[in-house]
Amino acid sequence: MKPIVTALCSFGMSGQVFHGPALKALPQYKIHKILERNQRISEKHYPQATIVKDFDKILHDPVVELVIVNTPDEYHFEMSKLAMEAGKHIVVEKPFVKKSEDAILLMEIAKKNHVLMTVYQNRRLDGGFLTVQKVLENKLLGRVVEFECHYDRYRNFIQEGSWKEDGDERTGVLFNLGPHIVDQALVLFGKPQAVTAQLSVLRTGGRTTDHFDIRLHYSGFDATLKCSYLVREMGPQFIIHGTEGSFVKNATDPQEELLKLHRLPDEPGWGKEPACDWGKINTSLNGLHVEGKIETIPGNYAHFYSNLFEAIRNGGELMVKPEEALMTIRVLEYCLKSNRERKTIEFKE
């Protein structure tokens, strides 16, 4: 089938590292236009694409089928709305939008205009997460009694001029990095019964949330999700305990660092982790004590776009449904409410 003619709305970090390389590696897509208002960085890597300085040049181009809204969060709603009203399918960068009511409105606009809308939750395609899914699906630990996930970084300075360093309570790591691990927890366990969250500003001179500790309460266990900008010595990314055993996974997915080196996700062995980074399991299976490492399932962020191609061209099921992205935003809003009121909040539809 003919490639999907695509436009990128930004060529910052997400365009350079995530969206651009995935589209470049897949013959199912053609990057037709790239919005760069002040620079021409994309020209070197995507010479076939036309650089435009005005979003209208994308909206009014009848050739463009898919628009990737990978701009700063504050522009997601309006740009997504305009693109879908122009009859374009859209991919929106996480965190989708800042308010659940805006997400609901965009879902209605997508339905009205008969276009597809999805949200770029690429961390569903991390190798560590894919491996955790298999461990839990196969009940290798018995009944889960405790789940903990970390998304930590070390950045002890304030990056002046960054839109991520200034703003209201919906700016900072809760809405920047939080959507990744909240989405992962929802994929694994579904809607929580209640939410408890503590949000903090830990860095000297910090103006936005740079630390969170979220507890999603489920029947029989809690899922603990933690993020901090002040973790210089990284610990495990996943810690899971069950009635039969435990699984611990260190190291983060290698894909992002490879992409920063301008490697493409169509390389042989893409996403494969070295044995030293595999997760450790210590459990009982059918009466036998099993202890050792589980090879990490290789991840590939390009599979997000392979799935989207099937959805657009063949009517396939979306990997990331708008309803799921909405649920992530609602959980983040419950985190804000829990932190403000300093209490556990029952999660209601």
Image (cartoon, rainbow, N blue to C red):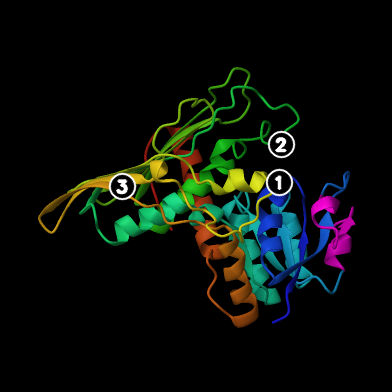
- Picture coordinates of residue 148, whole percent (x, y): 36, 41
Q: What element carries label 1?
A: helix
- Picture coordinates of residue 142, whole percent (x, y): 20, 54
Q: Which amino acid does label 3 sit on?
A: Lys
Front position in the image: 58 or 201: 58
Tag nearer the camera, 1 or 3? 3
* Mark positioned earlier in the residue sequence (1 or 3): 1
* Mark positioned earlier in the residue sequence (2 or 1): 1
- The disc at residue 74 is 1
When asked about the image quadrant of residue 348, the answer is bottom left
Front position in the image: 183 or 295: 295
Q: Which amino acid does label 1 sit on?
A: Glu
Above or below 329: residue 60: below
Q: Which amino acid does label 2 sit on?
A: Trp
Q: Distance between the residues labelled 3 and 2?
A: 41 Å
Q: Mark 3 points at which residue?
A: 293
Q: In which quarter of the image is the C terminus?
A: bottom left
* Mark positioned earlier in the residue sequence (3 or 2): 2
Instruction: Describe residue 132's horizontal placement relative to residue 172 as left or right.
Output: left
Q: Can residue 331 be seen in this view?
A: no
Q: Are there few (<14), some (14-19), or many (20+) residues within 10 Å of tag 2?
A: few
- Picture coordinates of residue 215, whole percent (x, y): 37, 41
Q: Do the residues labelled 2 and 1 touch (CB within 8 Å)?
A: yes
Q: Please report the residue visible at 23 percent of the width from the left and 52 percent of the height from the top.
A: 141
- The disc at residue 163 is 2
The residues colored magenta run 42-60
Front position in the image: 218 or 137: 137
Q: Do the residues labelled 1 and 3 touch (CB within 8 Å)?
A: no
- The disc at residue 93 is none
